[in-house]
Image: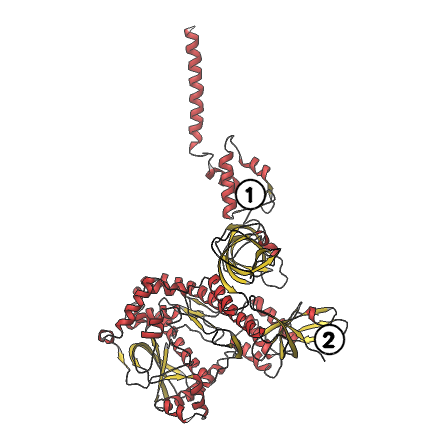
Amino acid sequence: MKKREFKQEKQIRSKAGNAKARSGKHAGKEKFDAAYYTEKIRAALTRCGKKPIGAKELAAKCRSQRGASDAYAAALGALVASGEVVERKHTYVGAAESGCFKAEVTRLSRTFGFCKRLEDETEFFVPGKFLLGAMTGDQVLMRPIPSRTGEPEGEVVSILVESPAQLTGMIVEEDKHCYLLPDTMSKSRISIAHSGNCAFAPGDKVLAQISHRGTRHAEHRARILFSYGCAQQAASCAEAVIAVSGIPTEFPEEVITQAEKLALAGVQPADLVHRMDLREECIFTIDSAESKDLDDAVSIQRRGEGYRLGVHIADVSHYVRGNTPLDMEALHRGTSVYYADKVIPMLPKCLSNGICSLNPGEDRLAFSAIMDLDKEGQLRAYSFHKSVIRSRVKGVYKEINTILAGTQTPEIAEKYAEVTESLLLMNELADKRLADRDRRGAPSLDAPESKLILNEDGVCVDVQPRTRGRSELLIEEFMLLANESAARVAREKSIPFVYRIHENPSPEKLERLEEVLNRMNIPHPVLDEVRPCHFAQILKNAKDSPLLPALNNLLLRSMAKAKYAPTPIGHFGLALADYTHFTSPIRRYPDLAIHRILSDVVLGYGKDWFDKRYAAFVQHASERSSAAELRAMTAERDCEDCYKAEYMLAHIGEEFDAVIASVTDFGFYVELPSTVQGLVHVGSLPEGEYTCDGVIHLTEQRSNTVYTVGQAVRVRCDKADVNSGNIDFSLVTD
């Protein structure tokens, strides 16, 4: 008995040992954990290629051990969450195999959105039904879909990372219940969750946060965070625009403290050591009457048959040192923001309007670009110097324009007596610089600008076109020259730098442009290897055409967006090989960054120093500055639309002369002489069947009535919605 029991026990121990051995044999190779199943899933989906595989089939291909369901589920869930695997209707496919890619939602409208592919920043148009309820800032998985316009289009496959993005909208009431009508993202009202202590009323402009997400925008629920007041007041709407854009309006306490300390110290004797003393030079500023942040001044001398031009820029980098609270806040803001009569400065006002502003009669630290030009106005030599200046006068564009035109009043003549000779010499040089711009083929493309007139209550009471006079052109040319010289220094020394670049138009946009030009019957050169002079020639060919304003906008849309980059690839719009932004360090961070780098150039540091200190910095500064610029431009435009709508509220029912600016399938947009634009909806036109060629014509088929871009029309203002910034017109017929 004992012998038999011993034999059985031995057999049991032997089996257990064999099992243990087998387990140990595979322990290092197959642990059957999440990592193991991750590789199994990847391999299975790769073998399937573009063909989706069902959930059961995928599990069967991957599960080799019982009891591992948790590890398998964890692995599959992680792959789906990261966007590597796409799940649709209980089937799975590899993202790469299905053509999917990661993207970020950049902006939304009520019926569509835009997503930026993370890999190369290509922007995709996304129809509203394909957004899956995605919000601005969400990281999503996308795939391309056939395009109707030639521009990239796509659909959201899944939302990978939800952003805490806030949104704005108007409170509407229905059946005694309040709802949120978003400014973007949805045509539908959104239910309001419990909003705590935030008081709001129907008709208010509010800031909200999505508290619950559905699979469509209309299924979301929102929590009201703040009410700005009446949605038909432009000031309230502008506040909301700024808030939702993420533009900071208040400075941190430590930033204010640092700035006030610097401002209080003023210009010290120690600050003047090793600086070029230009206080006896005839230097002065030229800016708008309302400007308080004067960051550039100019001087000129005749040198033989040529000129010595000085462009003197506030030495902001002397005060805003790298990696200080001031510097980090300036980088975060990126740029000052201007709308209506308000400024959100990049730097605290005690710096921007105080110690850094080149106010007349006060010693100020500057960074001077000294440029020698020949009798034809061609740049022959340039150098940069830390300096101290004392501006003679605060020049105003309008006043100086009268001097250059010979129509100045005695009061203006007296004010500018000390600098009049310099002004006349600058005007002479400007003529030659403008002629040089024409010779190198730089296209004269200008987006129309508006001037908003507000009353004492902050209500917009007038809108006027902002015109540029002779002094504006003069200063623009001199600033361009200083910027070009700064970029040349960096390229010559091969040092890390923040360049202002403007890439050539893409082949796709050029193909579309040629198609439109042919339909417009505007002669044009072959655009296969496009150069700036080609755009200049197109504008010249259309100079007497009523289509010229529309053509100007068309050419602007055909171009790439200018941006900041560490690689000098040139500036297409200016027809320059080297360009940067040097002249506005009070209001633009790239200029401040460049001042910091050029300061070390002046000190004589070698290339190794620049590579070590600035190689990573210029990449980071370029990316952050480009994003901040786009953010500011979008916010400024949206605010302006609200103020224009507010102005038109007082003119409902009035008639205006207008010009058709563009045509669409749903009507045409008109522009008033004031620069106000609005829509004449096809529903307000005489009944009929309308077709649009997508370029310049909207045609009623039965009567053959044609509405053409550039055509003069008479319109009536029917509606102005301040909340959305939309203005509706109707056609006035005899």
Q: Is residue 701 visible?
A: yes
Query: In the rendered image of this protein, does residue 79 appear above or below residue 658?
Result: above
**Percent position of residue 80, x then y:** 52, 45
Q: Is residue 560 visible?
A: no
Under circle 1, the secondary element is: helix
Using the numbered discs, state the Cα–Cα distance from disc 2 to disc 1 in whole angstroms: 57 Å
Kindly identify which residue carries mark 2: 705
Check whether the beta carbons of the residues at disc 2 and disc 1 lie within 8 A of each other: no
Which of discs 2 and 1 lies nearer the camera? The answer is 2
The three-letter amino acid code for the residue at tag 1 is Leu
Report the front residue among 554 and 332. 332
Under circle 2, the secondary element is: strand
- Scheme by which the image is coloured: secondary structure
Q: Which mark is residue 601?
A: none
**Percent position of residue 514, x then y:** 61, 72
Q: Residue furthest top?
A: 1
Q: On the rendered image, what quadrant is the N terminus found in?
A: top left
Dot 1, how many residues are within 10 Å of its Cα: few (below 14), some (14-19), or many (20+)?
Answer: many
Query: In the rendered image of this protein, does residue 505 appear above or below residue 123?
Result: below
Q: Earlier in the sequence, mark 2 or mark 1?
A: 1
The three-letter amino acid code for the residue at tag 2 is Thr
Give the residue at x 55% y 43%.
45
Kindly identify which residue carries mark 1: 45
